[in-house]
Image: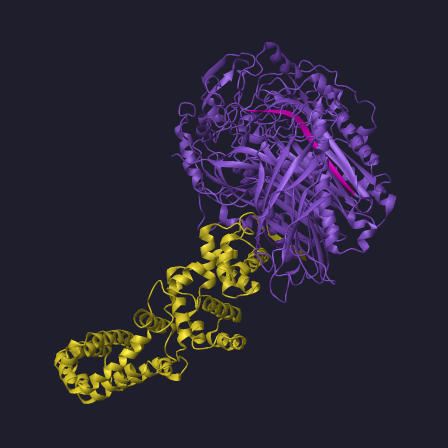
Amino acid sequence: MPGKVKVKISSGKNLPVMDRSSDTTDAYVEIKLGSTTFKTDVCRKSLHPQWNTDWYRFEVEDSELQDEPLQIRLMDHDTYSANDAIGKVYLNLNPLLLPGDGQLMSYSFNGDSTTHHEISGWLPVYDTMHGIRGEVNITVKVELFSDFNRFRQSSCGVQFFYSPMVPHGYQAKLIHGFVEELLVYDDPEYQWIDKIRTPRASNEARQTLFFKLSGELQRKIGVKTLDLGGNAVIGYKQSYDLEGESGIVGRGIGTAVTLVKSVNVCSPTVNEEIKEEHILSSQPEQNGGTCQQSAEPQKSELSPAKISNLSHRRSSDSDLSITPKGNSLTGSDKSGGHLSGHFMRNNLMHRSKIHQENFDMLEYPFLTILKFPPDFISQIGGAVSARSVKRLETISNIEEPESRDTWWSEIRMEIRSHARSLGCNAVLGYTEAASICEDVCILGASGTAIVLDFHKNEDFEDGGSVFKQNYPAKDVMSASLERNHFDREKMNGSNKIPESPEHPIHVPQNTPCAIIHLPYACNNVPLKATVGKCLMCRKGRVPEVLIATIEPPEGLPTTGRGCFIESYVCRPLKDVKGEWIAKEISDGLPFLEYELHRLLINKLKIKGMNAIFGLKFRITVGEKMIIAVATGTAVFLPALPSPSVPKIISDEMADDIKLVMLQKQLNETVKKNKEIYQIDDETQNCKVWSDEESEDEPSSLDLSSGNKDCCVLEVDDPEDEEVLLSLMKDRPPDGFHVVNTESIPGLDDLEIVENLQMFTQIRRFKFHPTLNIDEHFRKLLQSVYFKLRRMVPCALCNIQFICGIPEGDEVQLLVFGMALGLGKKQRKGKASVLKRTDEDMIFKLDEDNIPENGVFSVNKSSKFKQKSPMKYRQQSVKHRHTPHKERHGVDITPLSYVPGASIDKYLGNFNFFFIRETTSIREEGGLSGFLHSFVTEVLAIVRAHVAALGGNALVAFFLTELFLHHNFHKNQGQCLINVGGDVVSVTYLKEDS
Amino acid sequence: MTEVDVFISNYTVVDPEIYELWVEGHNASEAVTILNSKGLGQQTGATLELIASDVLDHYRTYSLLEKLLINPNKLQEQFLFQIDTLTRSLLIEKYYEFDDEVIRELLGKKLSSKNRKDLDEVAEKTSKPLKSCRRQFDNVKRIFKAVEEMAGNTMENIKTSFYLSDELAHKYACIVFMACMRFETTKKKLQYMSFNSFRICCEAIMDQWAYNLTGTEYNDLEMDREFLFELRELKALIEKEKEHKHLLTMHLKPKLLQKNFMDLDTNFKLYTRALLTLATTIHRSRDMRNLFVDLSQILEYFKQANWTSHDFEQFLLAFSQCANEIDTLRKDTAVKSSLDKFMKVTTKCLLVMYN
């Protein structure tokens, strides 16, 4: 059951001079796969050698094919002394093992040689001591032979997607569930042999190991996926824990699915519809509900800044008083007519399904994806997270990394029980993370508990109409309930948790607000929550504030624009070791999380919003401090109550006047924020958010007795005041729309038209844990804004922070994200659908020239007036981006879509681990210079590999680790970086107007 | 204290303003000051620290790019930076741009490493940063070495090997030409001449006197020796001095100011001898080298006599025109055309130098 790998080396170029005396190089190439090595002839005295070799053939087991990278090493031949290494190319062969033409394998893929992929082109030759040293032109082909062995250890053909969603052009026929794997290897850097070998050899041993680890993880997860009956893994995540002495832990988690190619990808209608950038909240008519079509004039009053429109609504929600954002339309005649976001372009999807029996069989009902096919979720429970602190001890038996497995299963069990206690049967947007400092390790996991609706799926199956209708791509997201500080520790110990979700599942209402209705009665849950009637349907119960770990759902009505929200907490650690430090961290965690949470909620209220999506938690531990970061995208949901303005209190009555001033300032900030983000909640405020009409239960709402921390700000000392002021002030400059989700909720008259720039900003500084870490994060973002100042108006999406504490008193912050060009929304066709009133038109035109910082008065005519001083305003600001006619090079984006283009093909996934070391850090421009050139080279290598696979973009790009060690006195530095993503080939859409 | 502060993007961003400061040889802190004084901080509300961090990012990128800029061929095919074509040409064009003052100082100097070391004098004299002078010196030397032996049109050669614009390539062609001819340009008498004057002169010389045979192994960096030898035949004119003078005075009388005409009448012999001596001797490479010195000598006469430039031009134009009407020359087309070629260039140079 082997595969045959054929490799051809044609030539090299721009090689370095290896022989100083003659200023040339005598280069040859070693090609290694597994234990087989071939060598080319020596090409004498040339920096641009031509080898033009025949095919070198390797015959290997397919499991080896998956695990082992193809290693191509360029050497300089030396007659009298040892041959010198020029550099290496590592090739991951997994993309070549995928079935050709994007056809995913059926269950028993037998690897017929229908694979037509090849890797071909110029690839950079990389040396860990010198960086890129020329290029080599390689062609690699793989032929697989049939394999029917049921007990095989390989999983060729299972495609892995880092994209946290069903890939474009595919439908998820079946979602099988959570797959994971954990591997432990010795770290070559810590082996005895490292003492006698060169740094280069040691770095290369490590790089090779990371490649193998990544390959093996994927192979094993692939086998598990095949066992479940799947053919692909989506929402895949891989992380490495460098535990030092105790080795390297590789972890992979993902969601096993059965993907099928969608029928009408790129149907001619798609292009047209791309122009229409509304979030169309159409409800699939699964109940055969007749659509009531009524133009409702009062809607424009309700939300003057919104589009008033024709709305097709279900009869069942006729008392709905707030329009869903955007237009609803019937999906009767246009297949895929409901273009939902900018990015769900051609992702026309059949209804996916999950077999309840199978799913219940799974140990963990977790799904790692962030976007879901429609009608998957009936209700949302709440965000769940679990954390534990462990001490690392050397793993005695590498083959059985039991302790690590046990640690993680404890955490997963905790998450599972949290979800169940919230009356939920699944967890979405599940992620795991670890932070290590010396021998202390914090493990954490989080996700969103939801109720998966199996019955609906089955009904469909019974009706025999499962795949007949072509439903629009729609992300139904879960939003998580904000619980007033869920005390995890307590939860952990409590025995009250029901072991299986036996409570009745609510029959889903067909209102757009249904998914945010709580799935549990609050008196059944061991936590305090403020709950009230849904302000949209007046039926379901909703929480006061929503937090979600996932993208904002498509169907969910929102008001106004979304914005980035974050909170940071830094706590010093006592100078103790071993068990004591572990205990200290463990004891402090709840307080840390509480503080983080409190800040986040207060910020949310100051923004005048009531829900957070895309929440990410990150805790980093260092020798002297621990830093927690929470980021998310805030939005306003009309179904939830408008947030109350936080009250400021103080013990020191002497400062009474000051307090009043502060409160006034705060109120004004909230008001201004509401204006800026176009939140109009006046109508809502008239309605009392209460639970009074509730028949099924006595009033469980007691605002006064609820946890007050979230509405009250205490200002007792200057430090508190500082925090308060910082809560009020951060807002991105004009022309920047910042979120950490994939697109911007409620971007009214603009749309994302093109990719501008993937950016990374890295800062490292001395920091004392008693100081305010906020300031540094703000500086980090400020410098990003400043550096992108020429790109406005632009959207910064998928902003992600990575925080590290490399030394006792040094903090390293890394932020990366995507800058996207905003252009005028194309209003083309669909005139009958998108009818606008004149009022809206005025609004649009005005908005065109208004920087967001300009305050506009919310009156009926929606006129703006400019007020605040225009910070960050350039004289030559472009007001609109128009998509470039031609694209050059390879696009890299952390998003899962490319605006202005459609993804034709997924060509495989990359996971690179690069190491770079130097003994002349001063000569390379210091630490900054060293890092700058290293990251630049890494991106260049990644792009070259994308191009060699035939792709022109890398989506779902990630940068998970960046370790930077240096010794200034020895003039040495070392840097490790882990990057990757999904290789795709995209077609840029031509402007047809 | 910030130890690392790095911003990296997938497409390489070039800020034309900062790039120019870098090319001009300002160090990062100077650049920050300059940018801030131009009002960047005020416009954007950015702190000095922020501007500095931006400048340093750009400076790091540019110094990584410099290796490629000195070999624009490599910049075209490199993969390390994703740069669009427009930005790429901007990068090269700006990098190869030079200050006329600096180049003027370099003219006539050997492009040796010794002279490179002495560039601080140039820097001082022109008040340009030393770094910028070095860059310009290196650029000239690099281009000189690359095209010196290359066959064909030098301007085209520079354009194709360095991806420069026509305008800049023209300028470099002149610089290279002057370096090849080793024209004497440093004499005190010539100090007043700007680079631009030399450039105009050289363009004319290259156009008229150099080999201009495309498709051969020659390039236009060498003088057309046959032509220079033919110029010796102009001795004949000295013999026909009287006739020549007669024609010339006839022709110029209505055109010149009285005083200039009088001067011409008296000094005709001196003037014509000076011009013709030059013509008949420049086949000797030493004399060719001193071309501009000799020309300035001729100018000296006219300046002393306070000729207006208009009249001077009339005289020069009439000089060859009238000589052609002399009987003996009228028949000898070869001599006639050499005289034309000679006078075209000389006229141009003298006029440029006269102003």
Q: Is residue B270 left or right of residue A298?
A: left
Residue A871, given in percent of the width and then of the height, sits at 51, 49
Nearer to us in this view, B121 or A662:
B121
Letter of the chain shown purple in the rendering: A
Quick one: quadrant of the C terminus of chain A?
A: top left
* Quadrant hosting residue A24: bottom right
Q: Percent from the top left, x then y, of residue A778?
A: 62, 48
- Give the left or right position of residue B203, taking residue A112 as reference: left
Work out whether A3 lies above or below B88.
above
Q: Is residue A311 magenta?
A: no
**Picture residue at 51% right of the left edge, 59% below the top:** B18
| Residue at screen point 52% across, 66% down | B25
Q: Nearer the viewer, residue A633 or B238?
A: B238
Is A780 above or below relative to A737?
below
The magenta segment is A248-261
* Side (left or right) of B279 relative to A228: left
Q: Quadrant of residue A33?
A: top right
x, y (%) of residue B122?
Answer: 48, 76
For residue A507, say whether it is visible: no
Q: Is residue A249 magenta?
A: yes
Residue closest to the eye, A933 or A800:
A933
- Quarter placement of the N terminus of chain A: top right
Counting from the top left corner in percent of width and height, residue B95 is at 48, 62
Determine the residue located farthest toward the top in the rendered image.
A463
Does residue A419 appear anywhere in the picture?
yes
| Helix, strand or loop for the magenta stretch, by majority | strand
Chain letter for the yellow part? B
